[in-house]
């Protein structure tokens, strides 16, 4: 615990000082983490976020398979009319059965492979630290997604078929997730639980590689750009504080005759000490005026969230066509607005046949 805390203190992000602010972020290494706490908290967050965003997945699956058409709002309204609000969470618990182990595998593979590649490039190939971090993040994301896809694919297939069950074009009729598992295993064999795995890999591997590679780069560039804004805001705040202190000093001077001489002398000594050594003005500042403990604040949150949003948008834009094909292959829905599209889905057509 103390090791983690000390690393957080040393890994200052946007460091504020009397002359401005600068981005000085350092990643926490895998060896410095408490694996049990980290995996537990990461998995709990993944399950919680998946629960909140799950209706989006249900709507997306209906749209991609063409079992429902129209705008997002129209599709959501139709699902609720047919199945109630529960329809927006159909297959959720089945999905979580795969998410929990898959997320643990993903995080472990990501951190281990990222650290190994970064150290290999930096120590043996002489690659610069920032470049090695970017390449390590890119490759680590790809490896992590490949490992997680193998674990997650069977439950994804079951959950997606439950999502569209009962809709026009759906060819499935399952009572629950376990019944779906037994039926697929009986009628399609083990290959049925891994239908579209190649398409799933073609989605998740480039998505994760692009996301982590671009996130590592964007975090650096946005952090430096944000430092200028942070510096300006901090300077304005500091000037306002100085003005308030000046006004307070004027108010105190009017009642100086009420303060004992000893107290006046002590206050003067304290002011002189601050002038000589600025670090005495705050327990969080060192002798150079730089904050020795840079808390995770608004600026860091803006940097990380902006980098994540842009990286995710880029990843989705690149991989969405294959994601559509993957969903159609795995659900075996009578997809497509034409007879040809339905025949492709039912016959188990390849990725190339779906695209061309």
Image (spheres, rainbow, N blue to C red):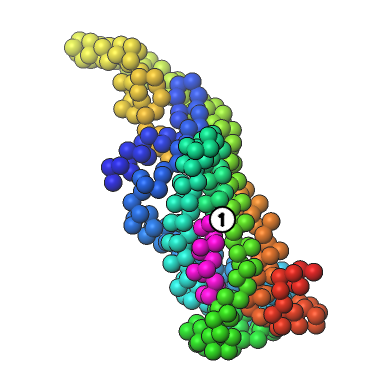
What residue do we see at 54% from left, 31% from top? 227
What residue do we see at 53% from left, 56% from top? 143
Residue at the front extreme, as displayed:
124
Residue designated by label 1:
142
Q: Can residue 38 be seen in the rendering of this structure? A: yes
Q: Nearer the viewer, residue 90 or 179?
A: 179
| Few, some or many residues within 10 Å of mark 1 (<14, 14–19, 20+) | many
Is residue 103 inside the magenta stretch? Answer: no
Residue 191 pos. (x, y %)? 58, 79
- Vertical position of residue 347 compared to residue 287: above or below: below
Residue 41 pos. (x, y %)? 39, 57
**Main structural element of the magenta stretch: helix, strand or loop?**
helix
Q: Nearer the viewer, residue 256 or 341?
A: 341
Res 63 → quadrant: bottom right
- Vertical position of residue 146 compared to residue 1: above or below: below
Q: Is residue 352 left or right of residue 83?
A: right
């Amino acid at each position: 615990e103390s090791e983690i805390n000390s690393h957080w203190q040393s890994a200052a992000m946007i460091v504020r000082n009397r002359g401005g602010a600068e981005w000085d972020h350092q990643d926490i290494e895998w060896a410095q983490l408490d694996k049990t706490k980290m995996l537990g908290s990461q998995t709990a967050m993944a399950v919680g976020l998946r629960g909140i965003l799950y209706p989006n997945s249900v709507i997306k699956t209906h749209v991609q398979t063409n079992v429902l058409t129209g705008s997002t709002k129209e599709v959501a309204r139709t699902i609720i009319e047919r199945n109630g609000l529960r329809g927006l969470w159909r297959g959720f618990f089945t999905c979580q059965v795969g998410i929990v182990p898959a997320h643990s595998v993903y995080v472990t593979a990501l951190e281990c492979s990222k650290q190994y590649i970064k150290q290999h490039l930096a120590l043996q190939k002489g690659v610069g630290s920032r470049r090695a971090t970017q390449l390590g993040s890119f490759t680590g994301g790809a490896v992590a997604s490949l490992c997680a896809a193998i674990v997650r694919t069977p439950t994804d297939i079951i959950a997606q078929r439950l999502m569209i069950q009962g809709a026009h074009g759906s060819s499935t009729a399952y009572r629950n997730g376990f019944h779906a598992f037994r039926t697929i295993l009986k009628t399609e064999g083990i290959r049925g639980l891994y239908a579209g795995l190649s398409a799933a890999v073609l989605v998740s591997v480039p998505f994760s590689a692009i996301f982590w590679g671009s996130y590592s780069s964007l975090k650096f560039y946005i952090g430096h750009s944000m430092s200028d804004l942070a510096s300006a805001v901090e300077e304005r705040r500091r000037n306002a504080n100085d003005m308030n202190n000046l006004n307070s000093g004027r108010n105190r001077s009017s009642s100086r005759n009420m303060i004992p001489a000893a107290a006046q002398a002590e206050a003067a000594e304290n002011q002189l000490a601050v002038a000589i050594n600025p670090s005495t003005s705050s327990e969080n500042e060192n002798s150079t005026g730089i904050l020795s403990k840079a808390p995770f604040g608004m600026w860091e949150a803006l940097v990380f969230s902006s980098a994540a949003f842009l990286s995710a948008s880029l990843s989705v834009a690149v991989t969405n066509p294959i994601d559509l094909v993957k969903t159609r292959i795995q659900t075996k829905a009578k997809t497509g607005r034409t007879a040809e599209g339905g025949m492709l889905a039912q016959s188990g057509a390849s990725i190339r046949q779906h695209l061309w």
